[in-house]
Image: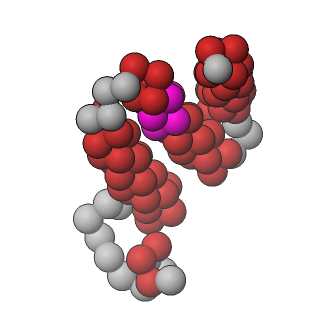
Amino acid sequence: MTAVLVLTALAIFVTMALALTRALKGPTIYDRIVAVNVFGTKTVLVVALIAGMTGHYDLLDVAVVYALINFIAIVAVLKLAKMRDLAGAGDGDITDG
């Protein structure tokens, strides 16, 4: 059981390193945004893995809150990248669908 958890943690950290590399070297802003989103998702997985390994399941609440913050931040950055203004809404807004 411990070997499986160690291999899982190692795989998550490898994918986090790859996402960080893509975030730093990404050719477009959208590649970088997706890489940061992947990094945030992997962080949620690490927190959930720590909660499972230690038995402190109250950390799952922290993981869910971090996932929600990650989602809201990615939507805000996408709107900023597309509209160049977070406050303005109008035609072609990212929330229009």
The question of residue 6 being in magenta is answered with: no
Residue 36 or 91: which is nearer the viewer?
A: 36
Rendering coords of residue 7 (x, y %): 71, 19
Q: Is residue 21 visible?
A: no
Rendering coords of residue 3 (x, y %): 69, 14
Q: Is residue 81 above or below residue 87?
A: above
Residue at point 67%, 45% (across, down):
31
Q: Is residue 63 above or below residue 85?
A: above
Name the quadrant containing residue 13. top right
Residue at point 43%, 59% (across, down):
75
Residue at point 36%, 82% (across, down):
90
Quadrant showing the N terminus:
top right
The colour style of the image is: secondary structure
Residue at point 44%, 83% (across, down):
96
Q: Is residue 62 above or below residue 64?
A: above
Side of 45 relative to 93 (left or right): right
Residue 48 or 68: which is nearer the viewer?
A: 48
Q: Is residue 69 above or below residue 55?
A: below
Q: Majority secondary structure of the magenta segment? A: helix
Q: Is residue 39 visible?
A: yes
The question of residue 46 being in magenta is answered with: yes
Side of 58 relative to 6 (left or right): left
Side of 31 relative to 33 (left or right): right
Which residues, given as a range, are shown in magenta?
Answer: 43-49
Rendering coords of residue 16 (x, y %): 63, 27
Name the quadrant containing residue 55. top left
Residue 19 or 96: which is nearer the viewer?
A: 19
Rendering coords of residue 27 (x, y %): 73, 39
